Amino acid sequence: MISASWIKYTSRFICIAPITLAAACQASVNFDGLWKHQGYGDIYQLDDTESKIYQFNSEGCVLAETMTKTDMQTTYFPNATLSHDGMTLTSRQIARPFAQQFERLSALPTQCQPGQRLDANASPVEIYHFFWTTMHDYYAFFQERGIDWAQVYQQVAPDLSDDMSESELLNAITASLSGFSDDHVVLTYGDDEYAPAPPKGVLRVLKQGFLNQSEISDFDTYVADRLAQISLMQQQTMDAGSVRIINGSSADTLYGAERVVWGTFNQGKIGYLRPNMMLLDTGENPDDPDQWVSNMAQVIDQAMQDMRNTETMIIDMRFNGGGADGVSLALASRFNPVTQRVIGKFTRTIAGDGEIHWLDLPAPVNTPAYTRPVTILVSGTTVSAGEVFLMMMKALPQVTFMGETSSGALSDALVKTLPNGWQISLSNEVYIDTQYQSYEGIGIHPDIPTTALTLDDLSHHQDTALSQAIHQLSQ
């Protein structure tokens, strides 16, 4: 999940083809109206004149976005099916393969009615209350993160007033968020953002390395430089002629354009695959996450074809910053010989837990599954859709995790707009395995613990964890 939110279905209608919001059979099925996304606090108004997204909590509501009906259909409902009674809309996208359900409303809630909504004229106190209530109603992991949210309010309340400046309001909100170690909790204000979670895994080591030097003054530049060095060193130690690099169309702050690297070690005996992100942007349909997943699936097919004769494989997830669950599913399926249920998720809000939506891991369609030994390198930086991939692979007997405990931040990021236009992202989804175990806040533990990256690695241009994995698989 790119730290952002994003439909498998069986048509139950008289139309034989899958129903989309723009399908020819739309005339007989009414998709227009108000749809509440269960467990997310969002209401979508599909209307020929102007389509809108409302975001609400138990105390207030804002009009978060206005767009054309076509744009709303394309972005949020590219495929959809209606229940027999026309009251439930079910959607599943390639990028976001878990089913999403929307309940038809006859009218907007009172707080979302004209004249009742909060807008840019809201006072600082109203803005803070809306922020606090949004977190109170929709954040799922206060207990796991050790946060007493009511106490946080009591600490900030004396400083709240309608006379406070914008910077003072910002200070109140950032102070309230300062105790969160969740990578998906981020406040965006203007062109800036506040992310309270401290760096973990390889990023923590890179932070230490940055502080120990003076040649490069910008942290992001330092990280990009060191990661490029690590990647080059890895490529130089792979078998000659085996290295493949797939770049994206844009330069990521940390990874540059590099998205996927693969090759072999030990004269073709050990395969190596490093996806830096669970997506591949190529410039084609740049706003379509489903296209990013399709792009990545094609690359995965090529990589698996190139490594089909290897005896073992290393999948390097130490640097993976997440992306789309659809990529996690596509990659994990290449190692799964028989379709099986491996993961589920549900929303957890102040109203309680939502319905569990289970996801089956399919077997590959046109090629045999790779069932030889696989070692997955993990760090505390492995996060979000990267961790969803780990959960899927954890169900497979040929897989061993090596490295550090993963980040423990699997939920999609639910983005909420505040009355003044600032945005807060939060975690409202609980991912579970078939034993109903959640890894949010605790991470996924390695079978073979080892340090994912060291300061000596940075200074001596080496990769100790990768060398250990190669040695382990060579025995």
Image (spheres, rainbow, N blue to C red):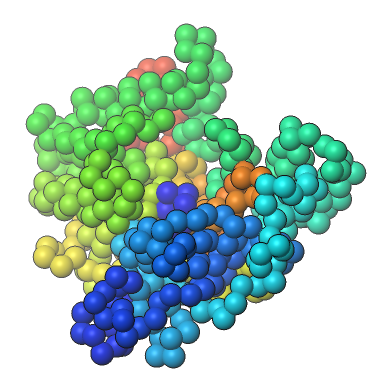
Which residue is more in the foreground, 12 or 180?
Answer: 12
Residue at (52, 9) in percent of width and height = 214
Whether residue 394 can be seen here: no
The spot of residue 311 in percent (x, y) is 16, 50
Which residue is more in the foreground, 435 or 179?
Answer: 179
Residue at (72, 42) in percent of width and height = 173
Image quadrant in which you'd find residue 297: bottom left
The spot of residue 428 in percent (x, y) is 58, 61
Q: Is residue 335 above or below residue 320?
A: below
Which residue is more in the foreground, 5 or 286?
Answer: 286
Image quadrant in which you'd find residue 31: bottom left
The spot of residue 209 in percent (x, y) is 50, 21
Image quadrant in which you'd find residue 162: top right
The spot of residue 393 in percent (x, y) is 35, 59
Q: Is residue 312 above or below residue 431?
A: above
Q: Is residue 344 above or below residue 151?
A: below
- For this orientation, the residue located farthest to the top is 215
Residue at (60, 61) in percent of width and height = 55
Which residue is more in the foreground, 289 or 35?
Answer: 35
Locate the C terminus by quadrant.
top left
69 lies left or right of 329? right
- For this orientation, the residue located farthest to the front is 49
Number of numbered tags placed on the structure image = 0
Residue at (66, 68) in percent of width and height = 113
Whether residue 63 can be seen here: yes
368 lies left or right of 137? left
